[in-house]
Image (spheres, rainbow, N blue to C red):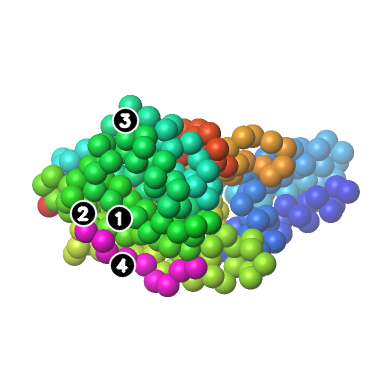
Amino acid sequence: MLVVGAIAVVVVAVLRLIGIDGTRHMLATVALVPYITVAGLLLGVIAMSLRRWVVGSIVLLVSIVLLANVAPRAFPDSRPNGVGTELRVMTSNTLGGIADASVIVDVVRSRRIDVLTLQELTPEMVADLDRAGLGSLLPNRVFLAEPGGSGSGIASRYPMQPRNLTGPSTLRQAGALVDVPGTDIEVVSVHPLPPVEAVGPEPWQRELAGLPPRDLKGPVRVLAGDFNATLDHVALRRLLNAGYVDAADQVGAGLVHTWPAQISFWPPPVTLDHVLVDGRCPVDTVDVVDIPGTDHRAVITQFVVPAP
C-alpha cells in the first residue's frame, strides 16, 4: 500500500508540474492537489519512519515541490501602489436559479457591491432578484437569462453596454463594458462547461482558452465567475500567465473553498469560483460568502482600477 500511495502522489505531481490537464478523471484528481500534497508529506514521513528510504525520499521530494506551489496561496502578496477608482465585484453561481435571491440582494446592499456577475441565471431568478430590490441597487444590467443552468448576467451600479468578449461557449457568458467613474472596464461572467461532464474536457478547455487575455492597449478586464477550475489546472494558469491575477491568491485567500458550499468528506471542498483582475489592479480584500440554496459560495473582491 505504501508503494501504491507513493506512485499515486508522484503521478499527480507530474501532471500538475508538467501542466497536463488530460482526461476528466485526471482533471478531477488535479483539483485535489492541496490535499494530495498534505497526504504526500505524511506518506513520506511514514515511509522514512519505516526505513523505506527510497520511497520516502521520492515522495517527500515531490510533495515539497508541490507545497512550494500551493502554500503561497495562503499568504498575501505585496500590494503594489495604485491610484484610481475603488471597485467591489461579487460573483455568485445561483444553481439553476434556486439560490436565495433576497440574501444575494442583502449582500449587495450591505457590502456596497458595484458589479455583480451571476451564473446559472434563470428568468425566475431575475424576477426574484427584482422583487428583492436588486434594480434599485444595481439598475444597469446585461442579463442572458435562460431556463436551467446555461444563463448568466452582469448587474452594475454604473452604466454599461453589452460586449461579446468570449469565444463560442456551451453556457452563456455575459460580457459588458462598464462605465466606471474616470475609466471603463470590461467584465465577463465566466462559466465554462464543467470538464467532468460525459462529453469530456474539450469544451471546458476550449471555452477557457476563449476567454479574453489582458489587453494593455484597451480597458482593464475582469473575469469573474465559476471557472470550474482550480489554480492547479493549466487551463486557468494560462490566463494568469496572460496578465491576470487571481484576487484571492493575491490576498492570501487562495485556499478558501467555494464548492461545495457545505463542507463534507466527499467531494472534498475546492476553489472553483474566482475573480481574475488585470495585473495592474491592486487587490485590497477578498471575502467568501455563503448563499442559501446554492452549492457555490459567492466571492467578493475589492480592488483599485488604475486611472488611465
The three-letter amino acid code for the residue at tag 1 is Val
The three-letter amino acid code for the residue at tag 2 is Met
- Whole-number angstrom distance, CA of label 4 to CA of label 3: 28 Å
- Whether tag 4 and tag 3 are in contact, CB under 8 A, the answer is no
Q: Which mark is residue 164?
A: 4
Residue at 60% of width from left, 67% of height from top? 201
Q: Secondary structure at mark 3?
A: helix
Q: Is residue 123 left or right of residue 40?
A: left
Neighbour tally class for label 2: few under 14, some 14-19, many 20 plus, Cα within 10 Å: many
Q: Which residues are magenta?
A: 160-170
- Whole-number angstrom distance, CA of label 1 to CA of label 2: 8 Å
N-terminal of the pair, mark 4 or mark 3, is 3
130 up-or-down from 193: above or below: above
- Whether tag 1 and tag 4 are in contact, CB under 8 A, the answer is no
Q: Which mark is residue 22?
A: none
- Whether tag 4 and tag 2 are in contact, CB under 8 A, the answer is no
Q: Is residue 22 left or right of residue 151?
A: right
Residue at 55% of width from left, 38% of height from top? 293
The three-letter amino acid code for the residue at tag 4 is Asn
* Residue 122, horizontal then vertical, whole percent: 45, 52
Residue at 11% of width from left, 47% of height from top? 182
N-terminal of the pair, mark 1 or mark 4, is 1
Please give the residue where the numbered disc 2 appears in the rendered image. Answer: 160
Please give the residue where the numbered disc 1 appears in the rendered image. Answer: 142
200 up-or-down from 261: above or below: below
- Whole-number angstrom distance, CA of label 3 to CA of label 2: 20 Å
